[in-house]
Amino acid sequence: GAVVSQHPSRVICKSGTSVKIECRSLDFQATTMFWYRQFPKKSLMLMATSNEGSKATYEQGVEKDKFLINHASLTLSTLTVTSAHPEDSSFYICSASPRPLQQFFGPGTRLTVL
Amino acid sequence: AQKITQTQPGMFVQEKEAVTLDCTYDTSDQSYGLFWYKQPSSGEMIFLIYQGSYDEQNATEGRYSLNFQKARKSANLVISASQLGDSAMYFCAMRELFSGGYNKLIFGAGTRLAVHP
């Protein structure tokens, strides 16, 4: 149990286009989901906390208009990178929290912007 | 503010030997939790072990144990009998409680472990 999926696992897009990444909890409901970004050989940096039915809470320095988060149901959160540029290329990881003290991570999405 | 420090960017160990990965933390909270995750080259984050600040005993999970020294604010991960498959990045993390009861995780910089045959 406690499986989190992400789709796509890998995406390459042209500069200026928007990319949507999905995060799904497959066998549990998650009121809260988290989105992280990881640069090569670096640690995970929390971008935002996504709460079902309400607006996401963004970490300081993260552009909310750039990284749109929608948590439409208890099993799905989406991250849309709008007007992507090469500096947005990164590894994006989501996690889902069915209850406090537990977080289950998705396998990550590698975004490359040309 | 809470902070996690991993001072070893890279470690190597001989297969079947034990290795300790260091982690120190800083927090003013009385109640907190510490995690260790493994990240192989494929990228997924694999949960290894958890220690709560009020847990009296050090956490253990198979070959993984957490050497928790509260007064020193350290939570080192010990891997016994290393295997080649243990080669990966290892992250120490602390949960930060925020409104609503759910927890953000603050991660350290990570330690890359290489297990040699």
Image (cartoon, coloured by chain):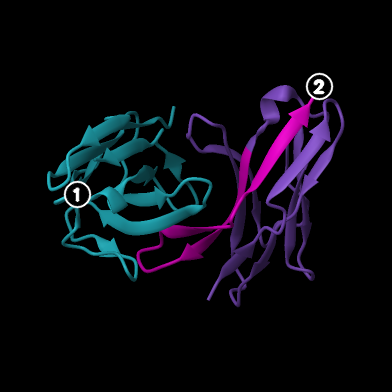
Say the numbered circle drawn on residue B61.
none
Residue, x 18% and y 41% (percent of image)?
A: A19
Q: Which residues are magenta?
A: B89-117
Which SS type dominates the magenta stretch? strand
Q: Is residue B100 above or below residue B67?
A: below
Are there few (<14), some (14-19), or many (20+) residues within 10 Å of tag 1? Answer: many
Say the numbered circle drawn on residue B117.
2
Q: Secondary structure at mark 2?
A: loop
Q: Nearer the viewer, residue B48 or A42?
A: A42
Farthest residue in the front direction?
A: A114
Q: From the image, which quarter does the N terminus of chain A lie in?
A: top left
Query: What type is the residue that disc 1 sits on?
Result: Ala
Query: What type is the residue that disc 2 sits on?
Result: Pro
Q: Is residue B78 above or below residue A24?
A: below
Q: Which colour represents chain B? A: purple
Residue, x 23% and y 60% (percent of image)?
A: A56
Q: Is residue A7 visible?
A: no
Residue B84 placed where, x, y %?
72, 23
Q: Secondary structure at mark 1?
A: loop
Q: Which residue is mark 1?
A: A84
Instruction: Tell me how many marks there are.
Output: 2
Are there few (<14), some (14-19), or many (20+) residues within 10 Å of tag 2? Answer: few
Residue, x 69% and y 30% (percent of image)?
A: B86
Q: Which chain comes out cyan in the rendered image? A: A
Q: Is residue B72 above or below residue B39?
A: below
Q: Nearer the viewer, residue A100 or B78?
A: B78
Residue A76 placed where, x, y %?
23, 39
Q: Chain of mark 2?
A: B
